[in-house]
């Protein structure tokens, strides 16, 4: 009888040990997934915030101030600013949009998936918008700069309005991402 009780207790201990051993990798995998989700969401939000902040600065402060310089000075300034700005803005938009897409794919609820997907699409939409609608104006201003002549004022007006669209869309994406983080979606 003692042998049977000892075997039963040993079997229960072994079962508990094995059960715990199998639960640990699951717990560890769950923790790894949570860390990955946190990183994806943080990178998406940070890069979107950097893009939106830069775009807002240009729309609210830099562009209006540069308009006061007059077309000749603004044309020269624009040609020097354009390459630097595009080297920063495009990677932020692409990385933020991609990370938001991954966050949407890994989200555990439909409202979280929808919110992260919306934010990713909003931020990602500034890339084709820029290339299809804003780039022709950019190229006209840059052509004037190469010819060392002032770009017509209407180009700067058009550019400012289109850039404001990028600012609003990226700021909306950033707001959605902040909401997702704040509500733990």
Image (spheres, rainbow, N blue to C red):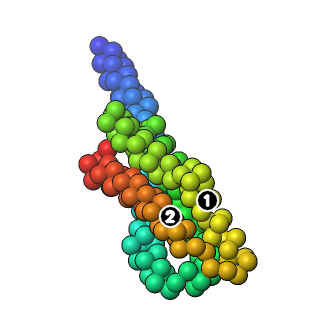
Of callouts 2 and 1, the N-terminal one: 1
Near-viewer residue (30 or 50): 50
170 on left or right of 151: left
The x, y position of residue 96, in whole percent, is 49, 54
**Structural crowding at the residue carrying mark 2, measured as other residues with C-alpha within 10 Å and reported as few (<14), some (14–19) or many (≥20):** few
Question: Which residue, given by chain and number where applicable, does mark 2 sit on?
Answer: 158
183 on left or right of 75: left
151 on left or right of 169: right
Residue drawn where x is 68% and y is 77% of the image: 145
Residue drawn where x is 58% and y is 73% of the image: 152
The x, y position of residue 142, in whole percent, is 66, 71
In this rendering, the answer to whether 161 lies above or below 78 is above
Near-viewer residue (93 or 135): 135
- Marks 2/1: CA–CA distance: 11 Å
From where the camera sits, is residue 121 visible?
Answer: yes
Question: Which residue, given by chain and number where applicable, does mark 1 sit on?
Answer: 135
Q: Which structural element holds mark 1?
A: helix
The x, y position of residue 105, in whole percent, is 46, 37
Q: Which mark is residue 111?
A: none
């Amino acid at each position: 009888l003692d042998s049977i009780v000892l075997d039963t207790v040993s079997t229960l201990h072994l079962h508990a040990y094995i059960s715990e051993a199998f639960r640990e990798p699951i717990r560890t995998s769950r923790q790894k997934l949570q860390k990955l989700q946190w990183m994806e969401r943080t990178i998406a939000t940070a890069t979107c915030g950097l893009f939106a902040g830069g775009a807002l600065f240009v729309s609210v402060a830099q562009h209006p101030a540069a308009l006061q310089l007059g077309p000749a000075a603004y044309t020269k300034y624009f040609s020097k600013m354009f390459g630097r700005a595009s080297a920063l803005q495009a990677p932020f938009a692409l990385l933020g949009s991609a990370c938001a897409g991954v966050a949407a794919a890994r989200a555990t609820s439909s409202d979280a998936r929808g919110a992260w997907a919306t934010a990713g699409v909003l931020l990602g939409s500034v890339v084709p918008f820029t290339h299809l609608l804003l780039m022709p104006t950019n190229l006209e201003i840059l052509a004037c700069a190469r010819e060392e002549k002032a770009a017509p004022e209407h180009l700067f007006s058009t550019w400012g309005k289109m850039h404001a669209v990028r600012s609003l869309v990226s700021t909306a994406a950033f707001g959605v991402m902040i909401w997702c983080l704040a509500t733990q979606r």
